[in-house]
Every structure is written in C-alpha cells, then in structure tokens.
Amino acid sequence: MEPNSAAELRRWFNVQRKFRLSAIAQYTIDVDTTIVSCPFSLAIDVECALYALTALFGKSSLVDLQSWSERQLICIYICLHWIFPDSRRFVPLLPDVLRHLPYLESLPPEDAPLTSLQFTPSELETFRGTNIYCATHDRQESWSTEWNKCRTFIHTIDADWTERYTWDKYLRASTYLSTRAFPSALLSRSPVLQTSSSYPFMIPGPVSWCTSYPEGSTEARDDSATISIISRTTMRLGEEVFNNYGLKANDELILGYGFTLQQTQWAIGRLASVRRLVAEISDEIGYEDDLEAAQLLLEMNDAGIHPAVGLMLKHYLEGQRDILTSLKLHFEERQEATVEATRDEGIELVFDDDSI
C-alpha cells in the first residue's frame, strides 16, 4: 500500500508539473527508458535557499547570508519548513517561499536516521579505536558550529524562531542532505560527478539522476532543463528500482548514511588496536572467534545498544579484518617473489626465524 506521504509527494509533483513517480516496475522497463523527471526549478539548492531566506529575513540579510556555506543555507532552508509547518501562513506575502514540505514529509521520520551522529554515547563508544569514532566527533563539532552561527543570526530576526530552531532540527536537515544530496555540478550544461566548486544539493524524488537540456537551450543553467532517472538495465514487472550509491566504504556509509554492507571490499580505515580485534593469520579465525563475536553482540544488546548499530559494528570490523588479511597475503607474496629473485641472482637470504 502506498504511504500517505508518498501519495502527497506524487500529488505535489503533479501540481508543479506532470510527472510520474514509481519505485516498483509495473511493466518491463527497457534500457535507456526515462522513468521520472524533475525540473531544475524544484531543486533545493543555494539559489532556492537564498530566495526564501531573504524573503523571510529581509533583503538586508543578504550580505550576512552570502558569508554562509552552501550547506548552512540549504539546511536552514529545510529547517524553516519545520519551524513554519504550513507555508500558507505567509499568504499573500510569499505563498511559495517554503514549497518543499511535501517532499520533506515523504523522507524518513525524525527518529529513523541512524548515522553515527544519531548514536547514543554508549553506542558510539563501541566504535572507540576506529576512525569512525574520531570522524563522528569532528563532524558533530563542525555541524554544531554551523548551527550556532545560524542560531545567533536568527535571534537578531526573531527570538521565537530561535527557540524552535533546535539542534535536533539542524541535525535532521544535515542528515537528509548527507544521505540524499547530489553534486551541484550536475546542474551545469556539461554535468560531471564532482568539481572543486560543487556543493551538495537536493532534488525531490527517489534517485540516480541524469541531466537533460531542452533542445536549443544555451544557458549555463536553464530551469526548464530536467534531471531524470534513466534505466541502464532492463527491469522486469514487479522489480524494485534501486539507486546505486557507488563505491563507498562501510565507514563512509555509517557516518553519512546509517547502514553497512556485509563483507564490503571497499571498506577503508584502520583500527587503533589491531591485535585485539583481528587475528594475525586468517587460519586462526575459528569457532572461538565466532563465539566471541556472538557474545559481544549479545552483551551490546543487553547494554541497550540498538541491534542495527551492533550489526554495523560487526560488518565494519569484518571489513577491516578482510583488508588486513588481504594486505598480509599481498606482502607475503611480494616477500616470496623477492626471495626467488635474489636466489636467481645467486644470493641466498637467511632469516632468523627460518620461515622462508
């Protein structure tokens, strides 16, 4: 059954322009079929945010707002939808100034995101000794600094707004942006995945997007242009349409998305205490290690650790173990190759442990 929030988002799309939103193939979808499109004019980007913020804070605020980062502008624009949950409050001033509420309400509810910034202190403590632990503290400090700067400015506009502009709202907006953003370089006439000047922006809808400009358009950015989901493989009736996140390590998925993949070969990072968490030789990993891991997860559950967080930790540590095991095998092979090369040259290497 279609959730009410999804139905409302679909109705909103239809009001803005004729679109069809689908997550499940209702029929076979051939390769290179446009599944859904969205115009640039509906993007949540810097232009959209500045327009709304100057309308609400006054044109004199533009100088201050232009000193903020793109992330701050977009996140506070999102937060304003929750401070003013009904944009019709501004009629007849600017009825469309906060126009993305249907989209925002279709996103996961406030208590659903589970990135490492939403972990409880005890849950985050289980990651102590990993790069995720430090990265989480660094990101929280950075986002908290942004929030406080915005909050101080808003207080000069309206003290009541400041009270409703909470850290939880800013964290929620920042999490939506980190989990659903695309590089702004996609809005250019020659879209690329990333440039040094690009920033994260959001497009209403589900998606892996491709840019399509109307024929004859010469503008660097044309709001009549669209971003579309294009099928790259044939999808059969009843198949779900998935978004490809690309090659991301589990530490990045935990920090920015709130989930992990089992045995991901792209996990990067390192553990501070390797000897305690990783067996030195892959053959040494036996039933004792499995029992120890199971006991650890059971103890975490008893300690009030969310099962999903425990699973993330398990996947993360497995990935680190696999990487270290792979590196060990790689350097053993290089060592053996070096020994063979020296023997071919008539040099015999002698090792104290006589392991070669």
Image (cartoon, rainbow, N blue to C red):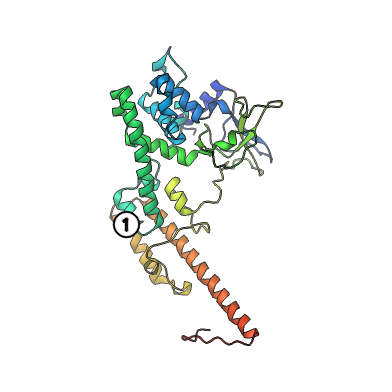
Above or below for 117 versus 290: above
Q: Amino acid at mark 1?
A: Met
Query: Which residue is label 1 attached to?
Result: 300
Task: Determine the secondary structure under disc 1.
Answer: helix
**What residue sits 39% from the left and 41% below the top?**
112
Q: Residue at x 38, y 64 (%)?
A: 293
The x and y percentages for residue 28 are 66, 39
Return the residue nearer the eye: 56 or 33: 56
The image position of residue 137, as x and y in percent, is: 35, 49
Location of residue 327 with respect to 208 vertically, above or below: below
Residue 101 in view in this figure: yes
- Relative to 88, does residue 13 appear above or below in the rendering? below
Q: Quadrant of residue 129?
A: bottom left
Residue at (51%, 35%) from the top-left corner?
201
**Residue 230, image quadrant:** top right
Quarter holding residue 4: top left
Q: Is residue 31 left or right of residue 244?
A: right
Of 298 and 62, which appears nearest the observer? 62
Residue 98 visible to the viewer: no
Residue 338 falls left or right of residue 32: left
Q: Is residue 133 above or below residue 274?
A: above
Residue 254 placement (x, y as % from top left): 43, 50
Look at 40% across and 23% down and name the residue there.
Answer: 61
